[in-house]
Image (cartoon, rainbow, N blue to C red):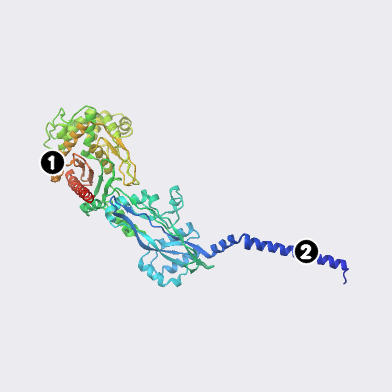
Amino acid sequence: MSYHPNDVTRRARFARGFFIVMFAALGTAFFRTQVLQSAEYVLQSEGNRLREVPVPGARGTILDRHGQIIAENLPGYSVALLSPTEDSLRTALDALSRVITIDSSHVELVVRRFRAAQQRPAVIFNDAKFADVSVLEERRVDFPGLIIQTAPKRWYPDGEAFAAVVGFTGEIKETELKQPEFEGYKMGQVIGRDGIERQYEHLLRGQEGLHFVEVDARNRVVRDAGVRPDVPAAAPPPLRTTLDLDLQKYIHSLFGDSLQGAVVVLEPDSGGVRALYSGPSFDVNRFTGGISKSYYDSLRLDPRKPMYQKAFKGTYPPASTWKLATAIMGMEAGIVDIDSRMAAPCTGGYYYGGRYFRCWQKGGHGHSTLGQAIAQSCNVYFYQLGLRLGVSNLVAGGIRMGFADRSGVDLPYETRPEFPHPTAKEYYDRKFGKDRYYNINSAALNLAIGQGENAQNVINMARFYSAIATDGRAASPHIYADSTYERKELFRLTHEQLMQLRLAMTDVISGRGTAASAAIAGLTVAGKTGTAQNPPNPDHAWFVGFAPVDSPQVVVAVMLEYGQHGYFAARIATRVMERYLKKSLLNANTSTATQ
């Protein structure tokens, strides 16, 4: 078949044009890919080839007021696994469990971490044991997706002494990742779980770094070093507190394993917490990297409740330590002064409405003044003062002094005290209904001596006594050294009235007061004992006070569960005061000598 020369020419032109257009399109595509979009494709290539391995940032060091370490970081090891799918991860974990101990519940935890953090290695252990790391290093060739690296490990040099205040750390939960305060956190990361660690998580959290490894198509690590410059992790600045490490350790030594209760030590002017202890304690270091079920169960099932911070979560009838509040209300209202006596003398009890309200002293205290009633803790005197004030004034005064509110200490989960609120009438209308008269006046008798519808935590009582130690104003207790504080007026007495109260409180410790056995030579202490009814169990023992009387530098509140008598708590409190004041004097002399 022959073609006309014009047809051949036309077809040749068409073919030439087709190939020109095709090569132009290909050239344009190659230029766009290799020149204009080269950076994007290089990045995609590296994304397929490189994997980001997070490097945990060290948490901030926690220091006491003198710069001594409360919490720090030690070198540890983390173990993670790169895996393309959940099935391959389970297969690898099954193989690992034949080499080291990994129980089924922990396998599920690792899988959940993998689901929540795709493209990141699934963390197997945040704090791996050195023995496990050694075995895995020897068998690394059998687990090509395995990543072992050093990681900071939280350590508390005096963990048992500080358990109630410093808290502990733990891995973030899936539910917490959805909360706004944890925005940016990822599964496998560690957060503060309680105490200072939880309260100041935003200041203690370390900045995570990145390490890059090269992987093949099956996510096996083929190169671990020099792939790409790492992004270094960073630790935040140290967090300085108002706590005194040596004092906290001393209190821990006083409690040992036999006592249970709480101690709070405040600097009265600023509200700075010098010590906060809850006993019995526990070792917070056991929580680092994950607590064992056996140890956690032993804490959870212990009837002494070691994990329950009794200083600011527990509430207890304040007993006679609250009589100072009643006395102050009476003095503010002009009902009594320090030398006032009540109509009926104390003969061991007081009859009201056909019921006999007892005094702790069976033989009675006779015709006491207010000052003597404070020193001897005479219930009969305060029963009568409570009736003269009336339940409405007792409740209103208690609310004004802060007994219905939390102390405001900068620690999480503080319990609100139990106290009639918002007004006596509304509260007792709900409680007693129409038959109110006798019950309300009985409530006044009980409230006046710190019993009845009144349960306070230890730190709130320390806060109230700091107002007595100063000028009627008190700051919210705080632990963070850089906190700003404002002193709030709780009551208003003249300087002379305050000094009269303090002198009456010194008789509690000296002379024939309820805590004379707690006196320490050379130390003048003002305070008040309390023995809180706790049926059917033994009574709780209280003491709250301050020293020295002429210029108070420290407030100490002690509550012993089932301690039975207030003077037992007073003996601990005066020893704590002595220790603190002697050390303060020594530090002051040392500072003066070096100037």
Q: Secondary structure beneath disc 2? A: helix
Marks 2 and 1 sit apart, C-alpha to C-alpha, by 115 Å
Q: Quadrant of residue 68?
A: bottom left
Is residue 124 shown to the viewer in this render?
yes
Among the 4 quarters of the image, the one containing residue 173: bottom left
Q: Is residue 47 above or below residue 590?
A: below
**Other-residue count near label 1 (Cα within 10 Å), few / some / many at <14 / 14–19 / ≥20:** many
- Depth check: give the residue in front, 50 or 588: 588
Is residue 162 or residue 73 the one in the foreground? 73
Q: Of marks 2 and 1, which one's residue comes earlier in the chain? A: 2
Residue 289's disc is none
Q: Position of residue 423 (x, y in %)?
A: 32, 31
Place of residue 213 in the rendered image (x, y in percent of width and height, measured from the top left):
48, 65
32 sits to left or right of 532: right
Residue 449 in view of the camera: no
Q: Is residue 341 above or below residue 271?
A: above
Q: In the rendered structure, which amino acid carries the disc numbered 1?
A: Ser
Q: Position of residue 374 (x, y in %)?
A: 17, 36
Horizontal side, residue 423 vs residue 512: left or right: right
Q: Is residue 88 left or right of residue 432?
A: right
Which label lies toward us, 2 or 1? 2
Residue wearing tag 2: 17
Q: Residue at left 34%, top 42%?
A: 484
Question: Closest to the observer: 67 or 204?
Answer: 67
- Which of the labelled discs sits on residue 510, or is there none? 1
Residue kind at label 2, given as amino acid type: Gly
